[in-house]
Image (spheres, rainbow, N blue to C red):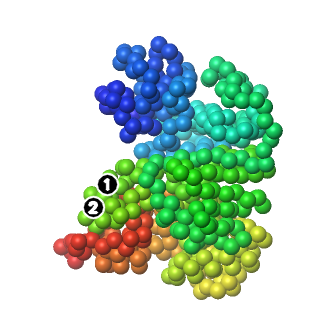
Amino acid sequence: MLPAEDVCRRARLSRDPRFDGRFVVGVLTTGVFCRPVCPARAPAEDNVRYFATAAAALQAGYRPCLRCRPERVWPRPDWTVASQTVVRALERIEQGFLNTHPVSELASSMGVGERHLSRLFRQELGATPKGLARMQRLALARRLLDETDLPISDVALCAGYGSLRRCNDEFRRVFRRPPRELRRRGPAERPAALRLRLPFRAPWRADWVFPFLARRALAGIEEVSDGTLTRRVDGHAVSVRLDGDALVLSLPAELFPATAALVAGTRQVFDLDADPAAIDGHLGAQPALAAAVRAMPGIRVPGAWDPFEGAVKAILGQQVTVDRATLLATRLVEAYGDGAFPTPEVLVDADVAAVGMPGARGRAVRGLARAVLDRGPDFLSDPREVRPTLLAIDGIGPWTAEYVAMRVAHDPDAFPASDSAVRKALDATAVEAERGAEPWRPWRAYAVMYLWATGATPRRRPNPTKED
């Protein structure tokens, strides 16, 4: 995953911002590691070592530079990681799984051994799962120190340390000073809510993402208006609003222990970790999409707050409009949710079709609930498993499987070729659309969003093959 050494050298010496987040630079003479854009005087090449991630540098014994703040680099996009096992495990780590569970349990949930999982992580990211979790806790704690007035004890709680002592010990090991000295502010009282900025790579189309989510918002659970999304989580309101070049996540004190999971969930729902330069650079060179990319650069693929909820809503959306699917989902919440989206345990034996849908679709929802109860929900987040598992359920077809892969499993190459809006935009059959979209790989899910957003049409229909 690390670029070639000569590429790293040129990027470091030129401070090329395109490589920020692609690697970090360890400096032998100072013992610190920096971003390639660090403004400090560039050290001699003999005195540097390159690492794929900040966690790898930290694990090698380097400490973060206090000037360029390498712990704040963009998360590595999933598409740069070859192993889907590592991608899935990273999602669990980002949600704070290793803050309360051992690596052996993480490996078991991935269906591999602990040693094999650690070997995959070292091959892909240069660090172990434990090292990635350590870096995540440290980065989140440092951001909370900088951006909030939380007492240090609450910083430790939100970051996942479990105790103030563990947090203090970690900061002394890494930064050689306790957290209070890095903050350089006096003690504060516990606030009623935490507000944390989540930056994104520009461009980012808020005028696309918020309306997209608003049409699919479930009454009583979430509301979207004026660049703000508010959602109920465990009975408490969590809000996300646009503020310049970042989203601001606000959560009440009761949810402080879930900070890591809520940050990870927000980044997935709003697709904040996407790299628009790479995506738009590729799709903008395609004749069918060039005009759309020029008109609306920075479109993202919105995710789902909860995998099961996202998959159920996809089934409800089969062969009906978005508004109709949202109405059905809202009725489902009213009938079986008790103020929240109904669980698989509730829906597995429920008369789902009674809310106003065909019986086959109701049975498909129950079949999904049974699959989640039997297998656990992890398959919904795995692009390799989600398609065959869903297609094995009566009443679920290719469109639904691809839609869930796109929005729930975060597969950037998912492509619902049979989607009516896609076929209309391309003036093509599903087979022609599938073939014509081959050059768009590995960003076909983003291409779908451009087609939905603009109704883009190609200069000509996709060329048929000789077999046609």
Pointer 2 with pointer 1, Cβ within 8 A: yes
Observer-nearest of 134 and 109: 134
Q: Amino acid at mark 2?
A: Gln
Residue 460, visible in the rendered structure = yes
Residue that label 2 marks:
286
- Rendered location of residue 369, percent (x, y): 65, 69
Q: CA distance from mark 2 to mark 1?
A: 7 Å
Name the image quarter holding the C terminus: bottom left
Name the image quarter holding the N terminus: top left
Residue at the location (68% across, 47% down)?
195
Residue 384, visible in the rendered structure = no
Quick one: SS at disc 2?
Answer: loop
Residue that label 1 marks:
282
- Rendered location of residue 256, percent (x, y): 74, 46
Residue 301 as seen in the image, left or right of residue 288: right
Q: Is residue 23 above or below residue 235?
A: above
Numbered label tally: 2
Quick one: SS at disc 1?
Answer: helix
Residue at the location (30% across, 73% down)?
457
- Disc 2: CA contacts within 10 A as few (<14), some (14-19) or many (>=20): some
- Disc 1: CA contacts within 10 A as few (<14), some (14-19) or many (>=20): some
Q: Is residue 251 above or below residue 292?
A: above
Q: In the rendered image, which quarter is residue 172 located in?
A: top right
